[in-house]
Image (cartoon, coloured by chain):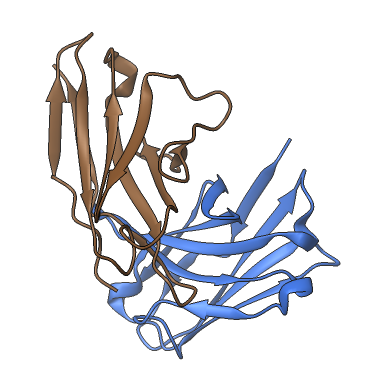
Chain colours: A blue, B brown
Amino acid sequence: EVQLVESGGGLVEPGGSLRLSCAASGFDFTGAWMTWVRQAPGKGLEWVGRIKAKTSGETTDYAAPVNGRFTISRDDSKNTLYLQMNSLKSEDTAVYYCTWYYYSYLDVWGKGTTVTVSS
Amino acid sequence: QSALTQPPSASGSPGQSVTISCTGSSGDVGGYNYVSWYQQYPGKAPKVMIYEVSKRPSGVPDRFSGSKSGNTASLTVSGLQAEDEADYYCGSYAGSNNYVFGSGTKVTVL
């Protein structure tokens, strides 16, 4: 079964840092392009960023609101995707989803992990 | 990158059809045949219903169909059923390795 399981969410103060993880199983993670998507409470979906497979250079791209503060990385030996979030702001409060970017669309989604930025 | 524009709500009676629009620009919807649609129930993760404008993943009922004209894509749900009541988001490749979602539409089955 194809599965993505996010973890690492929680409560963090403004200006703080948090690292999310996403454990993948049931598909060729090494060859997969992966993305992070977030959803603020009561709001719509927002693309956070994407990392390509190692064979495609493992390059990353980010949405403007998080560029320079968030970093996406992967450990193919552990089938795990990461999202390092620094300088967190209240507007980063959201459910964060890990997704498999299959060619042109987001094919598989995790259940999400909640990040709350508040003092 | 601004969100694609969707109507906040749409509704129909069981058995009827409902169509949701998704308007972007030549830099996203109009420039690529990479529009997809996602269904989301409250408190759940989204699920892809349509990809590459009009293709359905296996397991998605053929009541769901997609199309595109210029900078506007559309999702049509025919033969509405109670289980179709959900939020729907369009998404599109937006060039320069970016991706953009629509603002979302809440579909109500009357």
**Observer-nearest residue: A15 or A49?**
A49
In this rendering, would B45 be left or right of A77? left
Q: Where does the C terminus of chain A fall, quadrant-wise? A: bottom left
Residue B22: where, in percent of width, then height? 23, 49
Residue A38: where, in percent of width, then height? 41, 61
**Observer-nearest residue: A17 or A96?**
A96
Residue B17: where, in percent of width, then height? 21, 19
Residue A53, quarter of picture: bottom right
The residue furthest right is A77
The residue furthest front is B70
Identify the residue at horizontal 36%, vertical 63% (top origin): B31
In this rendering, would A51 be left or right of A28? left
Vertical side of A94 occupied by B34: above or below: above
Q: Where does the N terminus of chain A fall, quadrant-wise? A: top right
Identify the residue at horizontal 14%, vertical 26% (top origin): B11
Vertical side of A24 occupied by A17: above or below: below
Identify the residue at horizontal 45%, vertical 61% (top origin): A37
